[in-house]
Image (cartoon, helix red, strand yellow):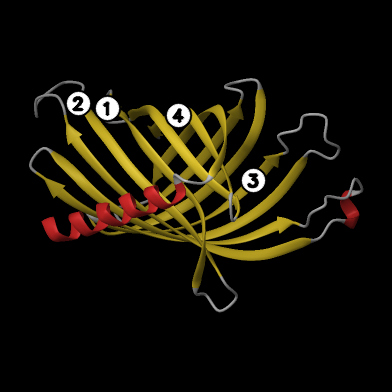
Amino acid sequence: MRIKFSCYFEVLLFFTTIISAQEYEKINGAWNAVFFDYGLNKKLSFRSEFHLRTVSFLDVWEQQIFRPSITYSKSKNLKWTAGYSFIKNFNSNVSSIPRVRREHNLWEQLLYNTPLKKGLISSRLRLEHRFQETLPLQENRSLRKFTFSSRIRYRFTYQHLLTQLDAKVPINLVIFDEIFIFLNPNGTPYRFNQNWTFIGFKIKFNKKLVLSAGYQKITFKRSDNDYFKNRLWTNTLVYKL
């Protein structure tokens, strides 16, 4: 296990060193999300996600996302999920006309958890099939077309319990790193897209309500020597119906 973790973080360190020499544009933002979970039976559950994402902290829209999904729990630690995302991407130039680029996104996901004495390690692999409006956008929506592409995402998450095991309101430290890779038409990974790094806290108020909040940094590649960093505060509220 130690060898696997060491190799993983060596890859992350190498990647960080490579891109640190590039040119960056830095922006600040805030991401807020609400998840509603509903158990259909012992194995199946349904989730609806609503994401509101802004830049210039709360001043300018970046994205709005509606994401329903259904999860099959093979066991307590192994879960399969399939879902759909409707995404509205906003041009950073608020005077741009048209400003909104729409995306329809179908995805499949595998999540595997490894319980620890006072924590949890999670590996999440997601495959996305993206239908995005072709650029440059047409003002007449009837003239717009969609392009198809795919990408794969891998997230490694570590959680550590900060309170006592029998605490009325458990609080966990949460750290994750997620890398996004574009796939070519043959399904082969070929180009880096972006990287997410997060550190924050997860607070379980009761059996139905969980809040995660913390600092997140996104490194996004636009071209060979052009990256931007989005530094943001993110809040995610999960409510079980």
Identify the mark nearer the N-term, 1 or 3: 3
- Dot 4 crowding, Cα within 10 Å, few <14, some 14–19, many 20+: many
Quadrant, the C terminus: top left
Name the kind of residue labelled 1 in the image. Answer: Lys
Kindly check if marks 2 and 1 are in contact, taking CB atoms under 8 A apart as contact: yes
As helix, strand or loop, the secondary structure at mark 2 comes to: loop
Check disc 4 and report the residue beneath it: 234
Q: CA distance from mark 2 to mark 3?
A: 33 Å
Name the kind of residue labelled 3 in the image. Answer: Ile
Check disc 1 and report the residue beneath it: 204
Name the kind of residue labelled 4 in the image. Answer: Thr
As helix, strand or loop, the secondary structure at mark 4 comes to: strand
Tag in front: 1 or 4: 4
Q: CA distance from mark 3 to mark 4?
A: 18 Å
Residues 47 and 188: in front is 188
Give x and y (percent) for residue 140: 92, 48
Residues 196 and 112: in front is 196
Check disc 3 and report the residue beneath it: 87
Q: CA distance from mark 2 to mark 4?
A: 20 Å
- Dot 1 crowding, Cα within 10 Å, few <14, some 14–19, many 20+: some
Name the kind of residue labelled 2 in the image. Answer: Pro
Check disc 2 and report the residue beneath it: 170
